[in-house]
Amino acid sequence: MPSQQISNSSSITEFLLLPFAGTQQLQLLHFCLFLTTYLAALLGNSLIITTTAWHHHLHTPMYFFLLNLALLDLGTISTTVPKSLVNSLRHSRVISYAGCVLQLFFLVFLIVAEYFLLTIMAYDRYVAICRPLHYGTLLGSRACAYMAAAAWACGFLSALLHTANTFSLPLCQGNAVHQFFCEIPQILKLSCSTAYLRELWLSVFGTSLALACFVFIVVSYVQIFRAVLRMPSQQGRHKAFATCLPHLAVLSLFLSTASFAYLKPPSMSSPSWNLVVSVLYSVVPPAVNLLIYSLRNQELKAALSKLLTGCFQKQ
């Protein structure tokens, strides 16, 4: 279906998403990869949520934030991938106007909330290693609930502002979105209004806040590494690093893929590159975060094993 040249965004009832390109064999391969990745992320994050909620000895700040991270990852990948899979089965590119609005809103909401949550998790590691005697005071159950709620609230507010501003612009450059889901840069390309400067100011503010969080994370880890290197016990140093490395790996994956997606050079803006890059930041992190956290966490692996063993025994 060709892109429709529409003069008023109010007359747009649907958008056309980027399909799986190539031959039928490549389309089938893409579909199978997306389906496998989605099912793995669905199963993995559901196991994290169930295990953390079920085992009382995991009711600590670190695992409470990990449970929130699993919820956000589950939401992020469920916002984009299922619609793409359904469209592929139907040999369609269509997403309704309301569906596009909701997809953009939830994607911004969940990604922003995840970044704030990763910042809070850095603070959790800082207090646990640098100020262990104050850990129970600074990170009590109420404080943890407030911090997690603040992360979700910041994501919600950011999504509300960006979504309202993006879809308030007149869209007259057609309705073809060069992405397999609706995202702000691609929707703005359809606008013919100079009012996109409002979105620019929102982006500048958001970027400044993101940089402030990044500086906070860097400062926290500088203090953490200094404290760990001063530990007299090699076993203590190893245990401290073991609790920090999964968070650092997840954070690095999150920042590197998101930065590459939005800061890539114009020469890498073809539809095929857009598909690859978008998969890197919207599909890969939610699918592998569980693996990163469970590989080096003996306590979590033991709890997962106990949960699965109990389920099989009941059967």
Image: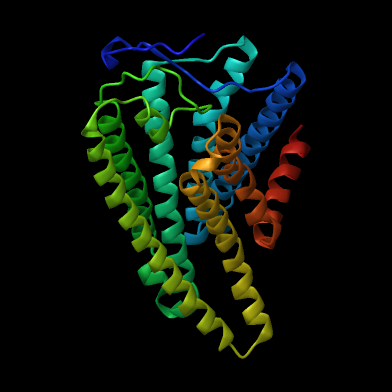
Q: Could you tell me residue 193's position as x and y percent?
A: 24, 28
**Residue 164 shown left or right of residue 114 in the figure:** left
Callout count:
0
Q: Could you tell me residue 249's position as x and y percent?
A: 60, 60
Compared to residue 9, the image places residue 183 above or below, namely: below
At 39% from the left and 67% from the top, the residue drawn is: 215
At 72% from the left and 38% from the top, the residue drawn is: 311
* Image quadrant occupied by the C terminus: top right
Q: Nearer the viewer, residue 231 or 166?
A: 166
At 40% from the left and 47% from the top, the residue drawn is: 113
Compared to residue 101, the image places residue 73 above or below, namely: below
Q: Could you tell me residue 155's position as x and y percent?
A: 35, 44
**Residue 6 shown left or right of residue 177 in the figure:** left
Compared to residue 118, the image places residue 95 above or below, namely: above
Q: Quadrant of residue 6?
A: top left
Q: Nearer the viewer, residue 96 or 263?
A: 263
Q: Residue furthest front?
A: 267
At 66% from the left and 77% from the top, the residue drawn is: 238
